[in-house]
């Protein structure tokens, strides 16, 4: 079962597995052509799809879920881990926002930087991340 959260009058579907995403997103979105789906669309019961990178199974599966949402003109947003999600949201045409919580930012060098309320991605290859050795040393256990 997906977790449905309502925030500020908008509904979010947190996708926690690829199988669930395929089933739920396809069932809900494809049903837009039947009477129940028309009521669902008219009521705007899904405003965006919030994809959890860890729960959905990684980057490839995240991109698949984003593609399914795009097919039905639904934007996608991230769920924590902005160090990676910033790249994913930027990579899809229906990417809307990155949930930005800087809990792990001290662990990495090269994470997206905030500039006037926008995330600026690193120019480094891949995700652009390396571990911050100072932080590793500070919290490491020998």
Image (cartoon, rainbow, N blue to C red):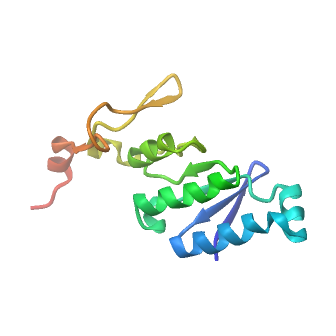
Residue at image point 39% right, 33% down: 121
Asked if residue 57 is positioned above or below residue 76 in the image, the reply reads below
Q: How many marks?
A: 0
Asked if residue 61 is positioned above or below residue 106 in the image, the reply reads below
Q: Quadrant of residue 31?
A: bottom right
Q: Camera-side residue: 88 or 32? A: 32
Residue 52 visible, this orientation = no
Horizontal side of 21 relative to 115 (left or right) equals: right
Q: What x and y, as percent, mark residue 44?
A: 82, 55
Quadrant where the image shows the C terminus: bottom left
Residue at image point 86% right, 69% down: 34
Horizontal side of 127 relative to 43 (left or right) equals: left
Horizontal side of 12 relative to 39 (left or right) equals: left
Q: What x and y, as percent, mark residue 37?
A: 84, 66
Q: Camera-side residue: 131 or 102? A: 131
Residue at image point 74% right, 66% down: 30
Q: What x and y, as percent, mark residue 23?
A: 63, 75
Q: What x and y, as percent, mark residue 13?
A: 66, 62
Q: Quadrant of residue 11?
A: bottom right
Quadrant where the image shows the N terminus: bottom right
Q: Camera-side residue: 69 or 137? A: 69
Residue furthest left as drawn? 142
Horizontal side of 35 relative to 93 (left or right) equals: right
Q: Camera-side residue: 59 or 6? A: 59
Residue 49 visible, this orientation = yes
Residue at image point 60% right, 44% down: 94
């Amino acid at each position: 079962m997906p977790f449905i959260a309502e925030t500020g009058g908008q509904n979010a579907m947190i996708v926690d597995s690829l199988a669930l995403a395929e089933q739920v997103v396809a069932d809900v979105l494809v049903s837009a052509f039947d009477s129940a789906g028309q009521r669902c669309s008219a009521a705007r019961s899904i405003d965006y799809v919030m994809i959890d990178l860890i729960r959905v199974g990684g980057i490839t599966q995240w991109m698949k879920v984003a593609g399914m949402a795009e097919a039905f003109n639904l934007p996608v947003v991230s769920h924590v881990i902005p160090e990676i999600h910033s790249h994913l949201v930027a990579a899809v045409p229906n990417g809307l926002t990155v949930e930005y919580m800087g809990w792990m930012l001290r662990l990495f060098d090269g994470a997206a930087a905030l500039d006037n309320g926008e995330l600026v991605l690193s120019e480094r290859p891949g995700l652009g991340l390396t571990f911050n050795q100072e932080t590793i040393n500070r919290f490491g256990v020998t």
